[in-house]
Image (cartoon, helix red, strand yellow):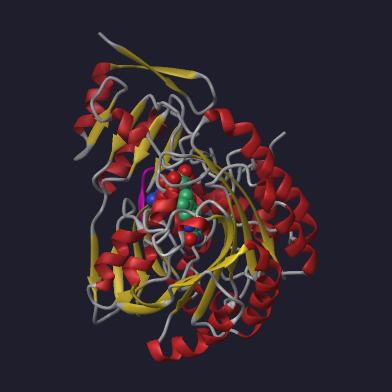
Amino acid sequence: MAKLRLKALDGGSTTLDQETVDQFAATLRGTVLTPKDDGYDSARTVWNAMIDRKPGLIAECLGAADVASAVRFAREHDLLVSVRGGGHNIAGTAVCEGGLMISLSRMKSIRVDPAARRAWVEPGNTLGDVDRETQAYGLATSTGINSTTGIAGLTLGGGFGWLSRKYGLTIDNLISADVVTADGELVRTSAKENPDLFWGIRGGGGNFGIVTAFEFALHPVGPEVMAGLIVHPISAAADVLRFYRDFCGNAPDEVTVIVNIRKAPPLPFLPTEVHGTEVLVLAVLYAGPMADGEKALAPLRAFGKPIADVVGPHPFTGFQAAFDPLLAPGARNYWKSHDLRSFEDGLLDTLLEFVPTLPDPQCEILIAQMGGATKRVPADATAYRHRDADFILNVHGRWENAASDEKCISWCRSLFEAARPYATGGVYVNFMTGEEAPRVEAAYGSSYQRLVELKRKYDPKNAFRLNQNIPPEPQN
Ligand SMILES: Cc1cc2nc3c(=O)[nH]c(=O)nc-3n(C[C@H](O)[C@H](O)[C@H](O)COP(=O)(O)OP(=O)(O)OC[C@H]3O[C@@H](n4cnc5c(N)ncnc54)[C@H](O)[C@@H]3O)c2cc1C
């Protein structure tokens, strides 16, 4: 009888016979895939093409009962486990080498109650899926800026985007969640039920269990919003960034402006001679009435001599997908990120010094404006700790061929080091690569010890370890 060799939790291996695997499969509504099965390769492929791991088994779950069954099976056989939501994480922790990958990607139900302004969302959905269902009622919750990102991982790390200055982080809109814990039990968590777990999953990532449903608060948004891009030549970047800093300092919560410095892609509204040259892009959205947005964004649009200004009424769902073509799956990606408390002159100069050496047309420097409602939630209300950051710097290395790995990665690291003097020391866990385990404690700051205690309570054996891990015991 065929045998399967799987990676065990302790780093060793476990052998399962086919009958055991078949018995496990029979407990699921979903499917169990082995490396020989059709669909195995697509099920293990994630957004970042630098991740190429081969799980020993993939459980494609269709509901919470499947997830509980998979967790119990892994526990019984002491298997290494990874959990896949949307498969978008830069670190690629959704996929394990040799163990059991519990995939939630087929759990895609969404139910919206427009009167109560609530949505119940399964963890295989993308942000685009959520927007599509909620926008049918002119509603939305606060998520990210790229429609193909998974809602599950984004929420568990914190979640910020176009609506977070107005409506808070994604976790600030989380009302409750259903969680399968490490012992295979399904529990509900909210401010009233298992509140310690509810605190932990709002920023603590996948450390405490597998979320099988999220309940979100919704808000009236759009369906059209004032949004778009303002593109400046790089020669104007220093002046634009200084103006941007002052503009952000006085901006109402409805305004969000994200800066993107890169080589211009061949966008149809840019003159062809600009394509491939370095530009500074201001991506803006106003989360409120159109006329107010026009007024609030007017000073930003009037500054300098932009190459293009395509700010105007856009469908919210369309703008949420505006960056998708530049962030399609299948490229090689490496990121470095800092939280920034302010946007000092020295930092602007440092960023611009790195522009002439952009190592690939797809690499970019991204500055996200934070603040607004995200800051008004008490720092200890959730496990997400860095609400004091006014900006987040993300150095996006992105390229196609492995031959460029070294030059792109070293450019990201150099810029990250050069920017360090201007950083708070905090970092958003969802922007960390797989090599950044030593930064996890800094990422949680003063929440860390409480998270360790929660981990000891909910996952003492560290069954959920393929994430930005919070080990229950100190590591050597
Ligand atoms: C192109 C791009 C744009 C992005 N933009 C934003 C943005 O605007 N705002 C923002 O906040 N973030 C953004 N992110 C980061 C994003 O939040 C993370 O990549 C997030 O992990 C994606 O979630 P996922 O479900 O796709 O992750 P996956 O890769 O599927 O999972 C990552 C980890 O999350 C955990 N996990 C996933 N699902 C569950 C679950 N149901 N239960 C328990 N644990 C689970 C597991 O530990 C898993 O290893 C972006 C990422 C990319 C690649």
- Residue 409, given in percent of the width and then of the height, sits at 64, 38
Quarter of the image where the N terminus is located: top left
> Residue at left 48%, top 36%?
400
> Residue at left 57%, top 54%?
277
Front residue of 225 and 104? 225
Q: In the rendered view, does 248 fall on the left or right side of 99? A: right
To which quarter of the image does residue 120 belong? bottom left
Position of 254 relative to 327 (above/below): below
Q: In the rendered view, does 272 fall on the left or right side of 215? A: right
To which quarter of the image does residue 433 belong? top right
> Residue at left 40%, top 47%?
328
Farthest-out residue, top: 1
Position of 351 relative to 400 (above/below): below
- Residue 47, given in percent of the width and then of the height, sits at 42, 42
Would residue 27 be seen by someone viewing this image from the given angle? yes
Farthest-out residue, front: 273
> Residue at left 36%, top 61%?
321
Which region of the structure is painted magenta? 183-188
- Residue 218, given in percent of the width and then of the height, sits at 35, 75
Front residue of 148 and 321? 321
Front residue of 5 and 109? 109
- Residue 362, given in percent of the width and then of the height, sits at 52, 47
Quarter of the image where the C terminus is located: top right
As for residue 8 lying within the magenta part, the answer is no
As for residue 185 lying within the magenta part, the answer is yes
Would residue 209 be seen by someone viewing this image from the given angle? no
How many labels, in total?
0
